[in-house]
Image (cartoon, rainbow, N blue to C red):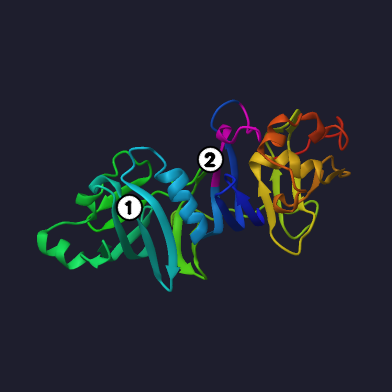
Amino acid sequence: MKNVELHLTDGIVVHIIALNGRLTPTKGDFPVFDDKQSFAVDVDSASITVSSQALTDDLNDYVFAAADAPLKKLSVEIKGDQMVVKGLLVSKGGVPFETDGTVSATPDGKIRVHTTKVKALKLEVKGLMDLLGLDTQKLIDTKKVPGVSADKDDLILDPELILPPPTMRGHLTGIRTENGAIALAFGPPASEQKQEGIATSCGGRNYIQFRGGSIRFGKLTMADTDLQLIDMTPNDPFDFAIDHYQDELVAGYIKATKAGGMCAYMQDYNKLPHGTSKSRHTSAKPATTSSSAAPNQSKPNSQ
């Protein structure tokens, strides 16, 4: 992937600056675009940014979405090198709280949020907590929250579990705050060699490319895949929503290559005509995705 605004859900969007990896089936024989849980993205290397708004949506709509979650009504703001989180401590009767913290990567590839300041009911209580021998681990029960654990005053977040499907599996090598967002770097552990990305077959500045293996989208199954999804308007990032990919595909066009591959020029999701919605995606027939461009003409490559 290169320069892609990837919609994991309608509200949770991450910016993929660059990503090299593999699609690995988690059920069935190969990845299916119409089922985000049919595959995982095994990341070899990547540079990804997540805005404070995306973090806020992710915490509320996914990480702490369960009715019995210990935290609710969360908001995230990045101030310099500090990540400020506000919300309600439901496990303590809905007490409003605010924490300041820094982020770092743990040796095993997790995200450590180190708490430097805590306020409750607008009063600073970090010093009182230290005096009473209390810490985040004792205040927040994270046992029922997948991907979240507490280590004394710190929260430990598992990047493989805190984002909606498709699951991204990779080794986090670095994290920092910048421009109101957090920047994540993924790469191989020190003992492994970094793999090279695949060469583009269709050109384009912003795209998602698949090569090798098999993949299915709509009614089209491709073997030895050579498929590239390309931004029709490359002056800004490729806004790609996997839940609505058919709408984006229908708004664009497909060209076959001499080598039997397919170049799919797609409209950004945020530029689709008014009225495009989940319901339109649900009712769309997969045949519209594939019929006109490369009828049986190739065995493209995809991974």
Q: Name which quarter of the figure residue 246 lies in.
A: top right
139 over 250 or under it: above or below: below
40 over 4 or under it: above or below: above
114 over 158 or under it: above or below: below
300 over 171 or under it: above or below: above
Assign a secondary structure to mark 2.
loop
Residue 24: where, in percent of width, then height?
57, 37
Q: Name which quarter of the figure residue 42 lies in.
A: top right
Neighbourhood count class around disc 1 (C-alpha, 10 Å): few under 14, some 14–19, many 20 upward: many
Neighbourhood count class around disc 2 (C-alpha, 10 Å): few under 14, some 14–19, many 20 upward: some
Q: Amino acid at mark 2?
A: Pro
Residue at 65% across / 42% down in the picture? 242
**Can residue 247 be seen in this snapshot?**
yes
| The stretch drawn in magenta includes residue 40 | yes
Q: Which residue appears farthest toward the top when viewing the image?
A: 28
Magenta region: 29-42
What is the C-alpha distance between the residues marked 2 and 1?
26 Å
The dot on residue 165 is 2
Assign a secondary structure to mark 1.
strand
Q: Name which quarter of the figure residue 258 lies in.
A: top right
Residue at 75% across / 32% down in the picture? 284
Residue 263: where, in percent of width, then height?
81, 46
Residue linked to disc 1: 88
